[in-house]
Amino acid sequence: MLTVATANVNGVRAAMRRGMDRWIADRAPDVLLLQEVRAPDAVLDGFFDGWHVAQQASDIKGRAGVAVASRLPVHAVRVGLSAHHPDGGAEPPVDTGRWVEADLEVPGGGLVTVVSAYIHSGSTWPADNPVKMVEKYAYLEKVTARLAELGAGTTPALVAGDLNIAHRCVDIKNWKGNLKNAGFLPEERAYLDRWFGELGWTDLGRAHGGEGPGPYTWWTWRGQAFEKDTGWRIDYQLANPALAPRALKVEVDRAPTYEERWSDHAPVVATYDL
């Protein structure tokens, strides 16, 4: 069995101070897929001594950053999506720290590809300056191209992380109030429709979590959002056709209390027959 957890840590140093290390010890995942690491390699390696670690840090200091921390041996690592950039050149700084792939060697032979992904949050404000949404849609195009490749392959593949899009009304508590906000725009949600339809990926959180509403994975730190469960489901584990049948269980590790949270996101943990 293989246990894989994905978590937007909202800064790995702060998360560790708040108790992430104790959660890791209790949960004992084989693979951790982290987003918003916001720390250099040396800091991350220090926290995950004894693990195989691969990271793509952001070119913008203090922003983004994605990582794979694995107990399994790493066969190969690929960072970024420059191969899918329109001009084939280097990615803009705003797109860095958002995509890292690792091919892991599973017991008994064979490989599984895991991806830690962190998609732009985007913004619809100010309405007359849509640059953040332009950046998000451009990045989603690159992600779609890579998902088409990974989805068509015979190697089991998992893409997990903070996608910053709630797919359907059951994935966001206050959906009526967010129809015109980034993260729940029809144009954003259409990308997920395509991934789960035409490209054949499975949203394991929904497949194993029932029809909803929820379970949510993100709540603002402000007000009573966590206590009232006014959340969004924006953290995912997506499996290609070669992996999806091997998923046995998927859970959202929501903290018991506000005080016990070590991030504004909850980890999504899945067990695979690998």
Image (cartoon, grey):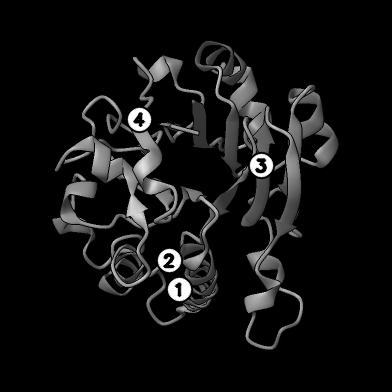
The residue that disc 4 covers is: 252
Q: What residue type is disc 2 on?
A: Ser
Circle 3: is it few (<14), some (14-19), or many (20+) Cα within 10 Å? Answer: many
Name, please, the residue furthest toward the front.
Answer: 108
Q: Which mark is residue 104?
A: 3
Query: In what element is the residue under mark 4?
Result: strand
Question: In the displayed image of the protein, which residue is found farthest to the right?
Answer: 42
In this picture, is 260 found above or below 110? above
Q: Earlier in the sequence, mark 1 or mark 4?
A: 1
Pick whichever of labels 3 and 2 is earlier in the sequence: 3
Point out the frontmost of discs 3 and 2. Answer: 3
Q: What secondary structure is found at the residue carrying circle 2? A: loop
The CA distance from mark 1 to mark 4 is: 28 Å
Determine whether, in the image, residue 29 is placed left or right of residue 261: right
C-alpha span from label 4 to label 2: 26 Å
The mark nearer the N terminus, 4 or 3, is 3
Residue denoted by label 2: 123
Counting from the top left corner in percent of width and height, residue 4 is at: 51, 33
Mark 1–mark 4 contact, CB under 8 Å?
Answer: no
Residue 57 visible in the picture: no
**Amino acid type for the residue under numbered disc 1:** Met
- Residue 145 is labelled as none
Residue 254 vs 196, above or below: the answer is above
Q: Are marks 1 and 2 in contact (CB under 8 Å)?
A: yes
Q: Nearer the viewer, mark 4 or mark 3?
A: 3
Q: Could you say where residue 178 lies in the image, as x and y percent from the top left? A: 23, 59
Q: Secondary structure at mark 3?
A: strand
